[in-house]
Image (cartoon, grey):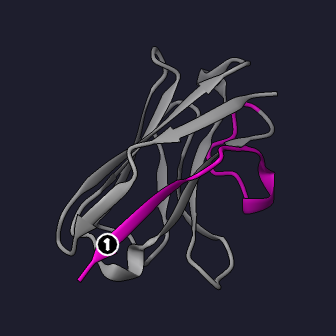
Amino acid sequence: QVQLVESGGGLVQAGGSLRLSCAASGRTFSTYAMGWFRQAPGKEREFVGCISWSGGSTYYADSVLGRFTISRDNAKNTVYLQMNSLKPDDTAVYYCAADSRPFRTVPNRGDFGSWGQGTQVTVSS
């Protein structure tokens, strides 16, 4: 089992930037794909993007494509979500998640078996 801890959330004005971090511990980080999800009040949790175990492939939801970037530092057991040009609609609790099986390039949503506690991102207009 892997433990995930997100950080970096906060309050930012529309058009601003934030970088979220997710530190992993408890198993070999470098062989598992990682994902970011978010959940706004009253809405279902939605997929934001993911990165392959090697870091060579990334995939994003249309709503964040071109504004958000996922990267990973396997030496630090950390995955990042760089968020630029933030909009009020990006306001949500952001969660990182780890794939349940190693060496997958792009997991399906149901493949993510471990979740962090979430970090709040609030974008003011």
Tell me residue 107's x, y (percent).
70, 51
Magenta-span inclusion, residue 118: yes
Q: Is residue 13 left or right of residue 59?
A: left
Secondary element at tag 1: strand
Tell me residue 82's x, y (percent).
32, 50
Tell me residue 41's x, y (percent).
59, 80
Snapshot quadrant of residue 68: bottom left
| Residue corresponding to mark 1 | 123
Check disc 1 and give the amino acid type: Val
Please, is residue 124 above or below residue 95 in the view? below
Magenta-span inclusion, residue 83: no
In front here: 100 or 80? Answer: 80
- Residue at the (74%, 31%) spot, across then down: 102
| Number of numbered discs overlaid on the protein picture | 1
- Residue at the (73%, 61%) spot, across then down: 109
Q: Which residues are magenta?
A: 102-125
In front here: 16 or 33? Answer: 16
- Residue at the (24%, 61%) spot, across then down: 84
- Residue at the (39%, 82%) spot, across then down: 89
